[in-house]
Image (spheres, rainbow, N blue to C red):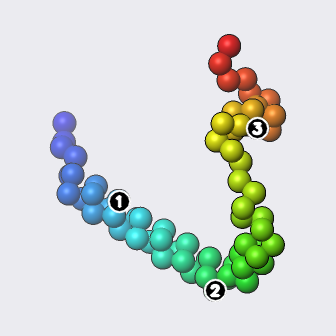
Amino acid sequence: MPRINVKGVIIGGLLAGLIINIGESILNIPVLGAQLEVYTVQGYAKKRVPVANLPTRLRRMQGVRFGA
């Protein structure tokens, strides 16, 4: 059975992460920058889902039951 090239896996993962970060920067700054600015100025970014209430909200959205 051939061995996994650990060095290649690590380098590949780091390179993939770098490419994703560059792509997200290109998308978020020049393409969606104005829309994101309006979003944050209007206060939508401050309306976050409380972590304690997250299972209830997920259950309502997906019809999934957590626990018993």
Q: Which mark is residue 58?
A: none
- Between disc 2 and disc 3, the foreground one is 3
Q: Is residue 3 left or right of residue 43?
A: left
Instruction: Determine the secondary structure under disc 1.
Output: helix
Q: Nearer the viewer, mark 3 or mark 1?
A: 3
As measured in the structure, the alpha-carbon distance from the residue carrying label 2 to the one carrying label 1 is 26 Å
Residue beneath disc 1: 13
Where does the image place residue 28, in percent across and percent down from the top left?
A: 62, 76
Q: Residue at x 74, y 27 (%)?
A: 64
- Kind of residue sitting beneath label 2: Pro
The residue at which mark 2 appears reads as 30
- Which three-letter amino acid code belongs to the residue tagged 3? Arg
Q: Secondary structure at mark 3?
A: helix
Q: Counting other residues with Cα less than 10 Å from the Cα at mark 2, is it few (<14), some (14-19), or many (20 or more)?
A: few
**23, 58: nearer the viewer:** 58
Q: Nearer the viewer, residue 33 or 17?
A: 33
